Amino acid sequence: MSLTKRLAQTAQETFGDFEEAVEKDATKTAVTDGTVHPLTSYVINYVKFLFDYRSTLKQLFQEFEGGDDSSQLASVTMRIMQALQTNLDGKSKQYRDPALTHLFLMNNIHYIVRSVRRSEAKDLLGDDWVQRHRRIVQQHANQYKRNAWAKILQCLSIQGLTSSGGGSSTAGGDGAAGSSSGASRALVKDRFKTFNVMFEELHQKQSQWTVPDTELRESLRLAVAEVLLPAYRSFVKRFGPLVESGKTPQKYIKYTAEDLDRMLGEFFEGKNMNEMKR
């Protein structure tokens, strides 16, 4: 009885030590592409192994404090998960790009949720825990979208392109200007050039980022496409004629909406620079 009690106490202390180690983990492993951190997979595997020894832990928890063994194991699991999320929040602040911060947190919390749903931990943590964390994944996906795409979408807005006074800001003698609500050809060209540069930078950068889960990767690309492509089609339809009637329109309207869609399909693949140059 004395040995069992001591073993139960040691188990509790071990969980406490592990929880603290997870929360304070300061490994410098750089996850530059925003994928699942090694700490996340390590902790999830640890939690899965706990459930392999569930019957033993049940006996130990009954000895210690005489409490409900299931609620004790649930409590331990929740505290470890919380320690992991606290640590991941800290690690996410290492990124200079806020969009990558949210992509990293989205990837890691999605991995946690998916792993819990596929294990016995789901029964202990409960549906509320799963649903709450799925919402957190979605919030980070939305924040990624806002941080990564807000500026480029501003390029496709009509704000600053049209003059309330009619033709005062239109390019002189431009017949197409009337159909473009008095927009200046020079301003429209500038918008197209800015959009091209920004999209190419996003493509180059975010093709190197990683979303390892296929379903999540596709849904994120789709969420971007649903906002970007209609805005681009509308902008080209409205202001394209101004550029097309001038010299070298292809210099400004470099991409069709289909081109953009195809390039979005290369986002989050974790390609390195050498692969992209081939």
Image (tube, rainbow, N blue to C red):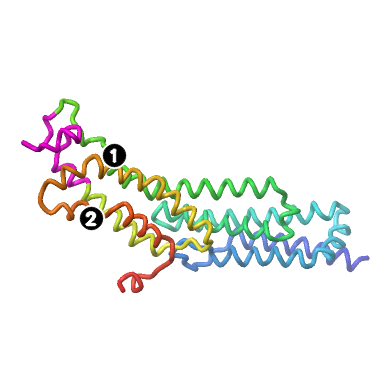
Whole-percent x, y for residue 75 in the image = 74, 52
Q: Is residue 190 magenta?
A: yes
Q: Is residue 20 left or right of residue 227?
A: right
Q: Which mark is residue 208?
A: none
**Label 2 to label 1, Cα distance in Å?**
18 Å
Quarter of the picture containing the C terminus is bottom left
Q: Nearer the viewer, mark 2 or mark 1?
A: 2
10 Å neighbourhood of mark 2: few (<14), some, or many (≥20)?
Answer: few
Whole-percent x, y for residue 255 in the image = 26, 55
Compared to residue 20, the image places residue 152 above or below, namely: above
Q: Residue at x 46, y 67 (%)?
A: 30
Q: Earlier in the sequence, mark 2 or mark 1?
A: 1
Residue closer to the observer: 184 or 136: 184
Q: Residue at x 13, y 54 (%)?
A: 248
Say what secondary structure mark 1 lies in.
loop
Q: Residue at x 58, y 46 (%)?
A: 135
Q: Residue at x 24, y 39 (%)?
A: 238
- Three-letter amino acid code of the residue under disc 2: Lys
Q: Is residue 230 left or right of residue 69?
A: left
Q: Quadrant of residue 18?
A: bottom right
Main SS class of the magenta portion in the image: helix
Give, as a single range, the part of the protein colored magenta.
Answer: 167-191
Q: Which mark is residue 157?
A: 1
- Three-letter amino acid code of the residue under disc 1: Ser
Whole-percent x, y for residue 76 in the image = 73, 56
Compared to residue 31, the image places residue 233 above or below, namely: above
The residue indicated by pointer 2 is: 254
Q: Quadrant of residue 187?
A: top left
Whole-percent x, y for residue 167 in the image = 12, 30
